[in-house]
Image: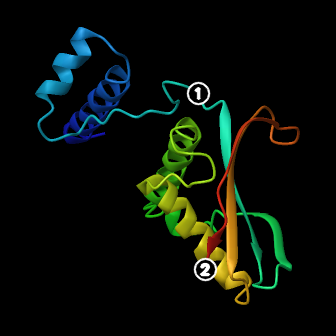
């Protein structure tokens, strides 16, 4: 190998060592990150600081104007994954917004009056998502209702720990 090849190998070795070092929380790595003005030492988070222990499921059902149930409880579809999502995932923020809306609705479900909906952006976001999907699946539906369920445990045997049932809405 030529001397320039050794220099290049050393540069990459120092960079790899720096990448590994900044993954650890310490005062020394904090100084190193402050010196990294070109952002060459990203901090990756392979594991969440608080592990996910529950899941939110949004389901809806719909009726025709004569009271006939068109669709029983149907969970909202998360959307198909695309190959491009591995590189640039535009729908991640929409999924995060839906999860945050579910958590907000479950946390504040007793704030409103019984029989009246929570008129909050979170509630309206979930209602809009359910309405959009319901209108595609059952165009003859005129009334919709959604529920938010929080489950814990293994996905094959989930345990429901909280649930919110919306009022019925005209489409």
Instruction: Tell me if residue 29 comes above or below residue 97 in the rendering.
Output: above
The residue under the point 14% across, 25% down is 34
Q: Is residue 102 above or below residue 17?
A: below
Find residue 40 and report its image quarter: top left
Residue 119 in the image: above or below residue 114: below
x and y, in percent, of residue 124 in the image: 48, 61
Crowding near the residue tagged with mark 1, few <14, some 14–19, many ≥20 C-alpha atoms within 10 Å: few
To which residue does mark 2 refer? 171
Residue found 27% across the figure and 34% down from its top: 41
Which of the two residues, 37 or 151, is positioned nearer the viewer here?
151
Relative depth, front residue between 10 and 20: 20
Which residue is at 46% across, 61% downward?
89
Q: Position of residue 166 (x, y in %)?
A: 65, 56
User: Considering only order in the chain, which callout, 2 or 1, is on the residue closer to the N terminus?
Assistant: 1
Question: For the view shown, which residue lies furthest in the top direction?
Answer: 27
Q: Indicate the quadrant containing the C terminus: top left, top right, bottom left or bottom right.
A: bottom right
In the picture provided, is 59 more to the left or to the right than 37? right
Question: Vertically, is 53 above or below 62?
Answer: above
Q: Secondary structure at mark 2?
A: loop
Q: Is residue 86 visible?
A: no
x then y, percent, for residue 136: 66, 84
| Numbered circles on residues, count | 2
Give SS at disc 1. Answer: loop
| Residue 51: mark in rendering | 1
Q: Residue furthest bottom?
A: 140
């Amino acid at each position: 190998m030529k001397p320039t090849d050794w220099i290049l190998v050393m540069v990459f070795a120092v960079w790899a060592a720096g990448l590994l070092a900044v993954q650890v929380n310490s005062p020394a790595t904090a100084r190193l990150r402050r010196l990294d003005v070109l952002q060459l030492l990203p901090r990756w988070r392979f594991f969440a600081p608080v592990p996910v222990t529950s899941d939110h499921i949004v389901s809806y059902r719909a009726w025709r104007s004569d009271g006939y149930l068109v669709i029983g409880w149907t969970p909202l579809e998360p959307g198909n994954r695309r190959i491009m999502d591995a590189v640039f995932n535009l729908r991640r923020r929409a999924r995060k917004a839906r999860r945050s809306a579910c958590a907000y609705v479950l946390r504040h479900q007793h704030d409103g009056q019984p029989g009246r909906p929570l008129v909050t952006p979170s509630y309206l976001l979930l209602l809009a998502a359910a309405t959009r999907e319901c209108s595609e699946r059952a165009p003859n539906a005129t009334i919709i209702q959604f529920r938010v369920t929080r489950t814990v445990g293994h996905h094959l045997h989930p345990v429901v720990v909280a649930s919110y049932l919306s009022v019925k809405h005209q489409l």
